[in-house]
Amino acid sequence: MFILRDLLQPLQSLFPSTANGRERSAWFASTLVAVLIPLTCARTSNLLRTLESLFGLSISQDRYYTFMASPKLPWRRFWHYLWQRISDPLTEGRFLFALDDSINPKTGKQIFACQNFFNHAAKDNQSRYPWSQNIVTIGLLKSVRGRWSCLPLGFRFYFMKKTLEQKIVRVGAKTITFQTKFAQAVEMLTELATVFTEQPILVITDSWFGNNGLLKPLRAAIGDRAHLLSRLRCNAVLYARPIPVQKRQRGRPRKYGVRLGQVAELVGYARQRAENYTISLYGKPRKLSAYDQIVMLKTLHCAARVVWVFRNTQWIALVTTDLELSVEQIIEYYGTRWKIEAGFKEIKQEIGSAKTQTRNPFAVTNHLHFCMAATTLAWIYADRMAHTPARRYATDARTVYAFADVRRAIADSIAKHGFDIGCADFPKPSQKSLLATFMRLVA
């Protein structure tokens, strides 16, 4: 059974039942698949050529560009639909959400959401403040056929406060107001909590997001089922848990116990008491030692479990508010956080969102929606495949399939089944044999 047909056919219900609505639903579904095919970068002009030459759609350039810049595409309903298509989203009874931001460098003026953001990862020959977009992204960390993957679930464009003070930025009739990255993250996580209900939510972040600026408003919005897992700064001060209040003791009960010291100061103490573990990290079982302790942190205003991890001569400290997590789970889950960084590369370079030339606010937003939705759709497709995709260029060090292998599997499936997603207004290609031959070359 063609998996894409089952995933994309229900999209017709998101559009009006009019002739124009059926036509736009066919364009919507076909654009998603055109982004997925490993043919070329996902520029709007390339997508239009793909739809015309491979899938037999006859669309004028003006109409398709108007469609790609439409403010009426049902993205909110589509994302809710896509979230519900993820099978077994839980990992050991928890939802693992990765949170991070990335910059998307651009060239040209009047590009929506572009500002001079600081790039902490810039190389010596690169600008430290490139003209770029800053995108706050949330993804679901999930094991898909033996490997960890990050499925993008939502994003927000971040605008600096000074930018909005200098000029008015509008998207249609709506004026953009300043929001911190914490507020944007809480807004997205709250919406996700309406679909992913009841079970605990573990937000895995880097040290920038891992503090009470995120945890406090998040728990105010969705309750105590929200937890953080982050890397702890080496200068963070740890406190013991407070001693229980004795009867008839005067004064307010203490929130924090005695000062234990900074994280870096306790490394020697932790190394002496560390235990050995073998944990799956980055696709391989790795031997390391770790020591954990439950402490109080003023950056989180609650009890947290701190884990010092030692490997060779290096060490890091991890912290989580979920006290039920074991040491092995804390280390492995934080190791999966890197998959959101790999996801940024897949979206910007492999899918090609970094190469788009759109400038209109709706066109920029719609294009990024298509790229992220196509990425999530690819991982859902891989999870539903009968067999694990084979890695094309396997080596002794790398045998697990990659994102590119999933895209080739989709192209191969299109070559075998054709592109019939069940949309009434979608024509069947007249040269099916040519389509199959070309798609096999791509795959």
Image (cartoon, grey):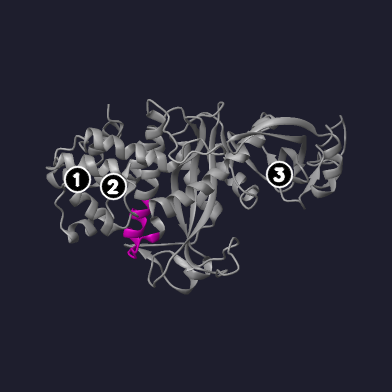
Q: Secondary structure at mark 1?
A: loop
Across and down, in percent, residue 170 comes to 37, 65
Which of the 4 quarters of the picture holds residue 260? top right
Whether tag 1 and tag 2 are in contact, CB under 8 A, the answer is yes
What residue do we see at 76% from left, 51% from top? 234
Mark nearer the N terminus (3 vs 1): 1
Question: Could you classify mark 2 by the number of other residues whose Cα lies within 10 Å: few (under 14), some (14-19), or many (20 or more)?
Answer: many
Question: In 3D space, how far apart are the residues under numbered discs 3 and 1 (Cα atoms)?
Answer: 56 Å
As displayed, is residue 289 above or below residue 74?
Answer: above
| Residue type at tag 3 | His
- Within-10-Å neighbours for mark 3: few <14, some 14–19, many 20+: some
Q: Pointer 3: what residue?
A: 301
Is 279 positioned to the left or the right of 402 in the image?
Answer: right
Q: How far separated are the C-alphas under marks 1 and 2?
A: 9 Å
Q: Position of residue 372 (x, y in %)?
A: 40, 47
Residues in magenta? Answer: 355-369
Residue under label 1: 55
Q: Quadrant of the N terminus?
A: top left
